[in-house]
């Protein structure tokens, strides 16, 4: 299945599928997604993922206070371990009660992940949402990044990544030379390409890009009449209308909107892998189908027009440049 052929994740040398399955929603995040996912369903979803053509999973210590990792760990144990060559990435997080995000907390967070996931070490460990404390605090002596570097020296983390929201902050982390992977979310989709500058900066620095939330948290998978939120916030009428037009054009070519939204990210050469949030076993199969759905060039031409991007999204002379059309929807500490 060529659309899911392994790619090298930058300097890590890890070989990953262009699709990664995200375990945020399957941990039960009703406050964000508006519905809960039972533990049984969450574990069953991970089990299906482990035996799918996808070899890359994304979770975090902080997702539902560790519940996502607990479910992932339960599925891995039930299967008798990870499949050969599978890459399970997780993230360190602040203390859920005190919000402490010091170096000491990062060490505790990783230790708890080791227990929940039943792993001795992580192929890829991210600093999660450092915007909650800011670049300077994260980089300070005794801070979160210093602790991550220690975890790498000790072999607990094979490779380090940084995952977060604001692209200008992520660019600063890319510039530190500490991280081999940067994860951005909701900012390289059919309706928002504000991470474009970050993609270029990371490429120049030799840092691999992982793009999460290609559906903007659901709207670009379910359609604006089912999911009225983009990036976990109510979308404005103009955005909904734009997505409706995209959905209509997709329907005209018999292509699901979600397939186009997913492949919009997969086909971007500066993105190594795209993280899709899933909450049920059948979503794993649907994601694989969407990743491989044939999409005619004519539809891409119409969609790139509606998306407001040039035909070649990597073109550095692209006059649309980095934009942040939905910035007003976000706060600094948002996922
Ligand atoms: N700061 C960070 O590190 C960060 C931030 C955001 C995301 N992430 C990672 O990226 C992952 C993806 O982000 P996300 O889940 O927020 O956003 P997303 O992938 O854009 O959207 C997930 C939503 O799309 C829906 N969906 C997926 N496949 C579908 C299908 N075939 N048909 C209909 N609906 C479908 C899911 O619905 P159902 O629930 O119905 O399946 C879910 O509501 C997260 O799980 C997490 O691992 C990381």
Image: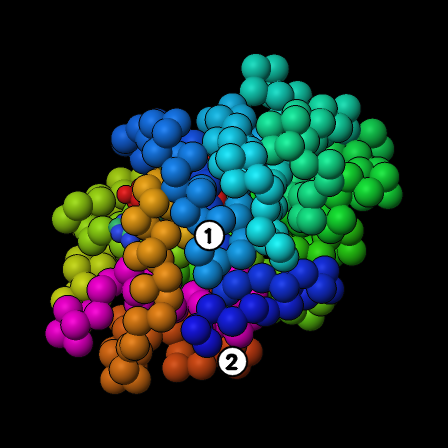
> Dividing the picture into quarters, in which one does residue 39 lie?
top left
Q: Residues within 10 Å of mark 1 (few under 14, many from 20)?
A: few
Q: Is residue 219 above or below residue 72?
A: below
Q: Nearer the viewer, residue 143 or 110?
A: 110
Disc number lying in front (2 or 1)? 1
Q: Which element is circle 1 on?
A: loop
**Which residue is denoted by mark 2 in the rendering?**
315
Q: Are marks 2 and 1 in contact (CB under 8 Å)?
A: no
Return the x and y of residue 209 as percentages of the image width and height.
Answer: 59, 60
Q: Would residue 225 appear left or right of 187 to someone viewing this image?
A: left
N-terminal-most mark, 2 or 1: 1
Q: Residues within 10 Å of mark 2 (few under 14, many from 20)?
A: few
Magenta-tinted stretch = 250-273
Residue 214 visible (yes or no): yes
Q: Nearer the viewer, residue 234 or 19?
A: 19
Q: Nearer the viewer, residue 264 or 288?
A: 288
Single out the residue that lies furthest toward the top.
97
Return the x and y of residue 120 as percentages of the image width and height.
Answer: 73, 36
Return the x and y of residue 54 as percentages of the image width and height.
Answer: 48, 58
What number is the disc on residue 208? none
Return the x and y of residue 199 as percentages of the image width and height.
Answer: 57, 65
Q: Which element is circle 2 on?
A: loop
Residue 32 visible (yes or no): no
Quadrant in which the N terminus is drawn: bottom left
> In the image, what residue occupies the spot 46% across and 52% down?
51
> In the image, what residue occupies the spot 69% across and 43% down?
122
Q: Would residue 329 appear left or right of 178 to someone viewing this image?
A: left
> In the image, what residue occupies the spot 63% across and 64% down?
15
**Which residue is denoted by mark 1 in the rendering?**
51
Ligand 1 within 8 angstroms of badge 2 C-beta: no
Q: Is residue 312 magenta?
A: no
């Amino acid at each position: 299945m060529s659309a899911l052929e392994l790619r090298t994740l930058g300097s890590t040398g890890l070989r990953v599928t262009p699709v990664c399955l995200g375990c945020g929603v399957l941990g039960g995040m009703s406050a964000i997604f508006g519905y809960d996912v039972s533990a049984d369903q969450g574990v069953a979803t991970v089990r299906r993922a482990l035996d799918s053509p996808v070899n890359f999973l994304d979770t975090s210590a902080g997702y539902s206070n560790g519940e996502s990792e607990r479910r992932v760990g339960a599925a891995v144990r039930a299967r008798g371990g990870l499949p050969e060559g599978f890459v399970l990435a997780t993230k360190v997080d602040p203390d859920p009660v005190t919000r402490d995000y010091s170096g000491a907390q990062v060490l505790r967070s990783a230790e708890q992940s080791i227990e929940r996931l039943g792993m001795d070490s992580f192929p890829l460990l991210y600093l999660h949402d450092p915007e909650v404390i800011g670049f300077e605090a994260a980089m300070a002596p005794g801070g979160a990044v210093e602790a991550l570097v220690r975890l790498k020296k000790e072999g607990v983390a094979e490779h380090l990544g940084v995952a977060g929201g604001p692209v200008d902050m992520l660019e600063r982390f890319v510039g530190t030379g500490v991280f081999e992977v940067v994860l951005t979310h909701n900012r390289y989709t059919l309706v928002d390409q504000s991470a474009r500058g970050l993609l270029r900066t990371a490429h120049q620095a030799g840092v691999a890009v992982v793009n999460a939330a290609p559906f903007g948290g659901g709207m670009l998978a379910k359609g604006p009449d089912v999911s009225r939120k983009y990036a976990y916030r109510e979308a404005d009428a103009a955005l909904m209308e734009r997505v409706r037009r995209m959905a209509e054009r997709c329907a005209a070519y018999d292509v699901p909107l979600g397939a186009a939204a997913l492949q919009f990210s997969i086909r971007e050469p500066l993105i190594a892998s795209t993280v899709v949030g899933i909450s049920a076993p059948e979503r794993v199969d649907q994601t694989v189908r969407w990743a491989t759905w044939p999409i005619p060039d004519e539809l891409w031409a119409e969609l790139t027009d509606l998306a407001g991007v040039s035909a070649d999204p990597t073109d550095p002379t692209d006059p649309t440049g980095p934009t942040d059309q939905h910035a007003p929807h976000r706060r600094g500490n948002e996922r």
